[in-house]
Amino acid sequence: MAKAQTVIPQACEQSIVTPKNTGRYLWLPIQESAPEGKVQVIVNGMLLMEQNVRMAREQVDYYVALDLQPYHGKEALRICVQNVPTGSVCFKKLVQNDDADYALIDEKFRPLYHHTPKRGWMNDPNGMFYKDGTWNLYYQYNPYGSMWGNMHWAHSTSTDLIHWKNEGVALTPDVWGTMFSGSCVVDRGNVVAMYTASRPTPFGGDVQAQCIAFSNDGGKTFTKYEGNPVLTAEDKDFRDPRPFWNEDVKAWNLILAVGQEMRIYSSPDLKTWKYESSFGKEYGNHGGVWECPDLFPLTQTTKQPNDQTTKKWVLLCNINPGGPFGGSATQYFVGQFDGHKFTCESMPKVTKWLDYGKDHYATVSFYNAPDNRHTVLAWMSNWQYANQVPTKQFRSANSIPRDLGLFTCGEETYVSVVPSKEMLAVRGAKAKKPTEACEILVDVKGQAEIVLSNAKGEQVIMKYDAAKQTFCMDRTKSGDVSFSEAFPCVTTAPTYGQIKQLRLFIDRCSIEAFDADGKMAMTNLVFPSEPYNNIKVKGGKVTIYEIKY
């Protein structure tokens, strides 16, 4: 481990830190309750970087890294700290070294087999694609604290959808603004990212525009297009582009969230876009802003008559607030798309939810997934309390990967959700009791009640009502629920028929429940003071598997 070097700021109106010639990282002490100050990188009098940082004033909660490698060799490199009193504790605690794991906290609520950032804040998954045997995941990221802000795109890769490698930051803020959500496509072997750049205006609010960047090394590094932005509008909440190649019309399509509707565009080259149509007026839930859209075809095979295969299009629409139990959630629509217009097959007031828990948002699919799969990840949190959950040096995880399909109940077509097959590959030996990382199978016989608990009296109660065809999860006594009035709750899902088997995935701070046939999914965070190590089941047979992580 590299020896820490304390850096003493020079005395001036604005605190100026002159980094040493050695040591890649300047470690910034953070106090979450402190107001935001500004940290600037200045070279030869030119401002090269500026971020909002909650520099510690009275106490240090954790450290974040300012990576100095891009500025090594630059003359007159200075770090300026604004809007932070010169007597603040942060100036006595600044450290510079080469240790990427300096002061890393071992947190009891860090998931063991879900993707998380090592440090900092994460929300929406972005730009997910599959190429050459590797799954690529980008995500909304704040490197300078574990609360929302300073949006970058960070990058992780995986060969099995479970174990992820941190690839660092891929896109950083620029003159057009911070890096909001977007998507990636694979075009003739190269990777093109399309994202929203968002910058504040002097009159309040912000301006959002769509930009592109390209990568010739498989998504490791990007070059921003010199002609950015490629799509602008005067609308508020104009963001989250999802381009895709539509073979039916031999053109690129784009679906984009704008306020409480989705707009569809077409393009021959990803640079020039033609408006085609809008969808959303009077359809589904409008309790909040529509965000993070996705649009893709799924096929359904019916046994009668003659094993007919039908293709339908699914439009994912993430909404905040407006979720079935408050806050953010993912709704969807099923219908047809001709390259110009999406037509929903349901009545306008019908609302369908992809997951009936509180903590499943910003769901989007991997572009170019193998075997014609439609594999999705979500952000496993809720905007009602995401900034307050009881973790410290990092916040938020992604859901386990899930594969989507279609099923019919009555006269409606719904999207099925099952854990991706990669979750079977990490299923380990059978266990007698639940552990902090396990999969629990419950073979259900009619009515069922499942209680997970620990010695502290904390518990999660799940009930399946076969007569009403509902499944519910009660986390009101699950552990720490004090950080938000919106956290303790009971969530309830329709099961669209009988459940024969439940699959429960437990990982330190989360429970993801699935009907094994894909007709119900429910994702909820929990923060027990110690792992649930006891299970009681009425109306079912339990099998517990360890998960290899």
Image (cartoon, helix red, strand yellow):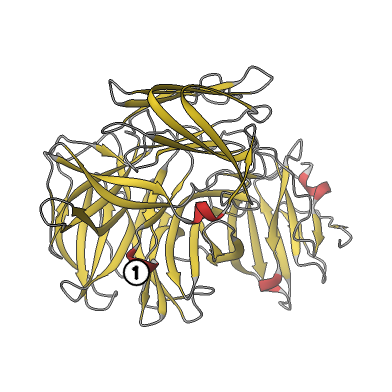
What's the residue at 63%, 51% (across, down)?
Answer: 548
Name of the residue lying farthest toward the right? 3
Q: Position of residue 192 (x, y in %)?
A: 39, 73
User: In the picture provided, is 343 more to the left or to the right than 231?
Assistant: left
What's the residue at 73%, 73% (across, down)?
Answer: 76
- Return the residue at label 1: 229
Note whether 86 is above or below 251 in the view shown: above
Q: Quadrant of the N terminus?
A: bottom right
The amino acid beneath tag 1 is Pro
Is 310 in front, or is 366? 310
Q: Is residue 529 visible?
A: yes
What's the residue at 83%, 57% (across, down)?
Answer: 7
Note whether 338 is above or below 421 in the view shown: below
What's the residue at 39%, 26% (across, down)?
Answer: 445
Q: Position of residue 436 (x, y in %)?
A: 64, 37
Q: Position of residue 414 (x, y in %)?
A: 23, 43
Element class at badge 1: loop
Label total for image: 1
Is 420 in front, or is 377? 420
Q: Position of residue 374 (x, y in %)?
A: 34, 58
Is 34 in front, or is 265? 265
Note whether 84 is above or below 249 in the view shown: above
Q: Is residue 44 visible?
A: no
User: In the picture provided, is 367 more to the left or to the right than 107?
Assistant: left
Note whether 101 is above or below 123 in the view shown: below
Name of the residue lying farthest toward the top? 457
Mark 1 Cα within 10 Å, few/some/many (few <14, many 20+)? some
